[in-house]
Image (cartoon, grey):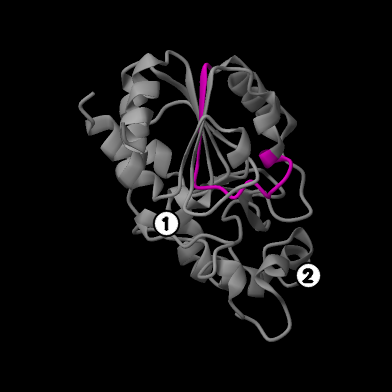
Amino acid sequence: MTEVERLAEIIRASRRIVFFGGAGMSTESGIPDFRSSEGLYSKTLHKHFSPEEMVSHSFFAQHTEEFYDFYRKHLLYPQARPNAGHEALAELERQGRLRAIVTQNIDGLHQQAGSKKVIELHGSVKRNYCMDCHGSYDMEYIMNNKPVPRCHRCGGLVKPDVVLYEEPLDNNLLEHAVEEISQADTLIIGGTSLVVYPAAGLVKYFRGNKLVLINKSETKADEWADLVIHDSIGKVLKAAMNAKI
C-alpha cells in the first residue's frame, strides 16, 4: 500500500478529522512560505532590517509607512486562488469528516475554497480595522490607500487584523483550537515546520488515533506520527481523495 493509499484509508476510517496547517499549504497557490530556502525570511529585502523585524509590532509602530510598503509587496496576494489542498479539505468538511481547520496562515484561502469552520490563529489579511473607532476595512482598502491607510470615518490608523511579532495570540482562538484538536480522532498536520510557538505546541493536545504529517521537509513531530509524507500538501490531499482502495 502506498503512502497516499494509507492516507486515504485513514481518512475514510475517520469521523472527526482536524487539519492543522501552515505556510506550505498555500505555496501551491503562489504564496511563498517563510522558512524554506526560498522563503521570505531567507531574503535580504532591506539594508537595515530583516523581514522578521519588518513584520513586528515595533516596526509597525515606529516605521508605519515602510511597514505598509513591505506588507503590500510581500504579504498581500490578491490574485491567489485556493489550490487542490484547500479544495480537498472543503470537500472533507462537506462530507462531515473534517470538523475544523486550525491554520497559521493569514491568506483566507480556506474560506475561499468553501471551508466554514476555520480557526485563524494569526488573523487574516482580509480583515483590517481602525485602531481608534474600530471600523472595518477589506484588503482592497489597504491596497488602494497609500502610503498609510487611514480611516475615512475618524482619520485613525488602519491596522491589518494579523498577529505581528511581539503580539500575543487571541486566547479564545487558542482555547478553541485546543478543544478541537483534543477531540479529534485524526489530526492531519500539513505545510508547517512546527517551529512557531505557541501554535506549534497545540500538537501535544492531540489524543486521537492517527497523527498524519504532510510536509516537504522533516519536522520534529515526524517521529511521533503514524504516517509521514514528505511531499506537497495539495498534491497529496487531492491524490488521497481520488484514491481507490
Q: Secondary structure at mark 2?
A: helix
Quadrant housing residue 149: bottom right
Q: Secondary structure at mark 1?
A: helix
Please identify the quadrant where the N terminus is shown. Answer: top left
Neighbourhood count class around disc 2 (C-alpha, 10 Å): few under 14, some 14–19, many 20 upward: few
The verdict on residue 192 being magenta is yes
Query: Picture coordinates of residue 173 (x, y %)?
Result: 66, 30
Residue drawn at (56%, 68%) of the image: 40
Q: Is residue 194 above or below residue 217?
A: above
**What residue is shown with label 2?**
62
Please identify the quadrant where the C terminus is shown. Answer: top left
Instruction: From the image, state whether disc 1 or disc 2 is nearer to you.
Output: 1
Quadrant housing residue 45: bottom right
**Kind of residue at disc 2:** Gln
**Residue extending furthest front?**
1
Residue 91 shows which numbered tag?
A: none
Callouts 1 and 2 close, C-beta under 8 Å? no
Residue drawn at (79%, 63%) of the image: 58
Q: Is residue 44 above or below residue 35?
A: below
Instruction: Give whichever of 58, 2 is nearer the camera.
Output: 2
Span colored in magenta: 185-200
Residue drawn at (58%, 76%) of the image: 43
Q: Is residue 168 above or below residue 37?
A: above
Instruction: Give whichever of 93, 9 is nearer the camera.
Output: 9
Left or right: 4 in relation to 245: right
**Kind of residue at disc 1:** Thr
Query: Picture coordinates of residue 111 (x, y %)?
Result: 41, 36
Residue drawn at (68%, 69%) of the image: 54
Disc 1/disc 2 C-alpha distance (Å) = 31 Å
**What residue is shown with label 1?**
27
Query: Picture coordinates of residue 180 (x, y %)?
Result: 59, 20
